[in-house]
Image (cartoon, coloured by chain):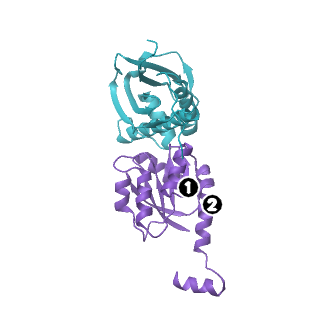
Chain colours: A cyan, B purple
Amino acid sequence: MTSAPSIPTAALDHRDCVGEAAVSIFSATCGVQLTPTAENDTLCEGGVIIAIISVVGDVEWSIFLGLPRDTAVALAAKFAGFEIPFDSSDMGDAIGELTNILAGEVKNRLHARKLRCEISLPSVIRAESLRVLVQSRANVVKACFASPAGALWTGLTAEKGPGLVA
Amino acid sequence: MDIHALVVDDSGIMRKLVMKSLHETQLANFTFTEACDGADALTKFDPETTGMMFVDWNMPNMNGVDLVRRIRSSQKAHVPIVMITTEGTVEKVEEALDNAGADCFVVKPFTADILRKKLEPLFEKLSQDAAPKKGFFGRLANQFA
């Protein structure tokens, strides 16, 4: 088996894969339709859970999925088929798995564009108030969504490489 | 048909979803043992009682495809192994099925209907293998089965 040659890619080219994958997987796993909305900085206040997965290969990304408390409880129940308290270990497990499925779908979409990458296991953080800080040289893209289960957001960070537009 | 299945996934929620979906397929009367990664699965795999395995790919300690290779290299009996994973590229499917020796590949997310359609050929083969063989040589084989 021979692998296709790598295609050079700018750090945030193909970022549309993340939003498209989110819409697809939340429909398939939770039966909810995501609608893109304007950026909302209040989504990390009053209880939030964030899962992060690294993507390495032809792209070097970190993918974030952020859910306010009420959204997390509603979506986790739809995903698992039973109620999961926000503060339980099952909640971290459920959101980690949703993020794993999201990253897998992103990987499949990148692969369809001849980009090869591997994904890490998810890390999950839960807090009452949380702000994501990234390295100053990293590119950051955040996409907010509304859904019948509540608001949520996806984030994508990519390190700037040589030759990129600042 | 009674099947005791080993469900291997580092997510407890995902193990529950796999078990719930398998019950919903109504392909067999399933009972389960759970394992949280490949290394845990190796300690819980019993060639006498494990009738089928459902294995995630990305797990800590030992990943799913390494587990499949270990099982295939160490066991004479061919326990059916189903990979259930987010890894859906052609290369990963080939690696799991052709290289490591899994029997079936299911991409997450899935529903009980998708699972049933994927597993039906496997269960048809299991039913054929379990059916008493006819004819002289068949009866002879049944005696030594």
Q: Secondary structure at mark 2?
A: helix
Q: Residue at x 45, y 62 (%)?
A: B72
Task: Pinpoint residue B1: horizontal percent, then vertical percent.
Answer: 56, 68
Mark 1 is surrounded, within 10 Å at the Cα level, by few (under 14), some (14 to 19) or many (20 or more) other residues, namely some
Q: What's the amino acid at mark 1? A: Cys
Mark 1 chain:
B
In this orientation, which residue lies closer to the viewer: A110 or A75?
Answer: A110
Mark 2 chain:
B
Q: Secondary structure at mark 1?
A: strand
Residue assigned mark 2: B121
Mark 2 is surrounded, within 10 Å at the Cα level, by few (under 14), some (14 to 19) or many (20 or more) other residues, namely few
Q: Residue at x 63, y 65 (%)?
A: B124
- Upstream in the sequence, badge 1 or badge 2? 1
Q: Residue furthest top?
A: A166
Residue assigned mark 1: B104
Task: Pinpoint residue A61: horizontal percent, then vertical percent.
Answer: 43, 28
Q: What's the amino acid at mark 2? A: Pro
Mark 1 and mark 2 residues within 8 Å of each other at the beta carbon:
yes
Q: Quadrant of the C terminus of chain A?
A: top left
In this orientation, which residue lies closer to the viewer: B59 or B18?
Answer: B59
Give the alpha-carbon distance from disc 1 to disc 2, as whole Å.
9 Å
Q: Residue furthest right?
A: B135
Q: Residue at x 40, y 65 (%)?
A: B74
Q: Quadrant of residue B134?
A: bottom right
Task: Pinpoint residue A133: horizontal percent, then vertical percent.
Answer: 34, 20
